[in-house]
Image (cartoon, helix red, strand yellow):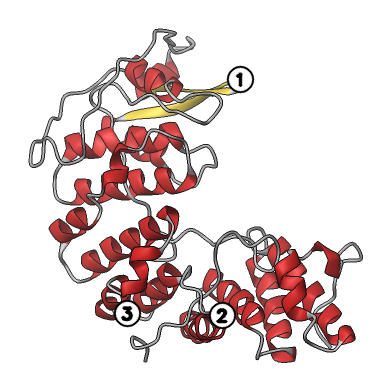
Amino acid sequence: MGPALPDDVSFDQLDSDVRDELLSLPKSLAEVVGRHMVAAGRLLDEEPERAYEHAAFARRRASRMGVVRESAGIAAYTVGKWQEALSDLRAARRMTGRDDFLAVIADCERGLGRPERALEIVRDPAAADLPTESRIELRIVAAGARRDLGQPEAAVVELQVPELKERRARPWVARLFYAYADACLEVGRRKDAREYFARASSVDRESLTDADERLAEMEGVQIVDVGEDVVWTDAEDLFTGEEPERSDESPGVSDQSASSAAGEDEEGGADAADYSRARASSDPDGDDVTEHASGSPGGPASVPQTGHERSAAVGTERDAGSPEEDAGTGS
C-alpha cells in the first residue's frame, strides 16, 4: 500500500508528455503511478517529506520509466537524500537522454562531500547546450564547490558571467545576483556585495533569497513592514514612535558591471531612503528592472548546500528539464 492520495488528484493533471510516456505501462498501473507523481509535485515545496513518499512509491512500481526516476530523484534531493537522488537522476538522464538536471546532480555530489566531482560535472560538454537558467544553476553549484575546497576567489570567478548585467526579473537572475554578492562578501569585496544584494532584492519577486536581510545586516539597518510596503530604517528609529521616512524619488541608474571595482571596498553607508529607492526600482510588471543606485549589492544563492533551487514540480508541468544521469562522474 502506498501513501494515501488526495481525492482531487487525477492522472489527467500530469503534463501530456509524461502521460504519454506512462501509458506504455498497463493502464491501471499507469494511473496509479501517475497520480502519485501528481501528488509528489503538488507537495514538493510545502511538504517535501510527504512528496518524497509519493515519488518513492511511484519509483517502486515503475522504476524503468525515465520520468518516474526523475520525479523520485528530485523528491529525494529536496529532503537531502543525496545518494538516492544521484542514483535516480543519473538513471533518468540515461533513460531520457536529457541533460537539464546536471546542476542537481552536481549539487548532490557536493552534498556527499565530493566537490571535485561536482566540478567535473560542471565541465561536462553537455552543459554548453543547456538553457540559460540551467547553465546559471551550474555556475552557482560550481561556485559552492570552489568554496567547499577553500577557494573563495575562484568562486567569485565562477560567477562572473555576462548574465550579471541582466535587467529582467527572473528567479534565476535573483539567485545569480545573490550568489555573486555572497561570494564577493566572503573575499572582502563589500562594495560589489552591496551592489548585488540590492539587485537581487529588486528582482526577487518570489522571495527565493534573503537578500533584503543580508543587505540590512551589512548596513546596520532593520526592515520594517508599513502596511503592504517594506522600508529600511535605522535600528534606533524603531524606538522613537515615529514612522520611518520613505522616499518617492526615482532611483539613479548605475550600470556597474560585476568585474568593475574588483578589490575595492567602499564601507560608505547609504541612508535608509537609498535602500527604499533601491527596492522601488524594480519594474512592477516584472519585465525590466532598473539597476540600483550606487552602493547596492547582489549575488548567488545556495540551495541544499549550493545554489540549486528546487526544480519544477515533479510529475506536473515539466519545464525544459528532467533528471540526467551523470555518465562518467559518478561513484
Label annotation for residue 154: none
- Displayed quadrant of residue 40: bottom right
Q: Nearer the viewer, mark 2 or mark 1?
A: 2
In the drawing, does residue 113 fall left or right of residue 39? left
Residue 30, compared with residue 245, is above or below; it is below
Which disc, if any, is residue 113? 3
SS for dot 3: loop
Q: Which residue is mark 2?
A: 96
Question: For this rendering, which residue is in front, 227 or 30?
Answer: 30
Q: Residue at x 50, y 31 (%)?
A: 287
Q: Are marks 2 and 1 in contact (CB under 8 Å)?
A: no
Disc 1 versus disc 3: nearer the observer: 3
Where does label 1 land, which residue? 227
> Of all residues shown, which one is farthest toward the right?
7
Residue 257 x, y percent position in the rendering? 21, 35
Residue placed at 40% from the left, 29% from the top? 222
Contact, CB < 8 Å: mark 1 with mark 3?
A: no
Which quadrant is the N terminus positioned in? bottom right
Q: Earlier in the sequence, mark 1 or mark 3?
A: 3
Give, as a three-letter code, the residue at label 2: Thr
Q: Residue furthest left?
A: 263
Residue 218 visible here: no
Q: Amino acid at mark 3?
A: Gly
Q: x%, y% of residue 280?
A: 45, 20
Q: CA distance from mark 2 to mark 3?
A: 27 Å
In the depicted structure, whether residue 178 falls above or below residue 140: above
Residue 43 position within the rendered picture, expressed as x and y whole percent measured from the top left: 70, 63
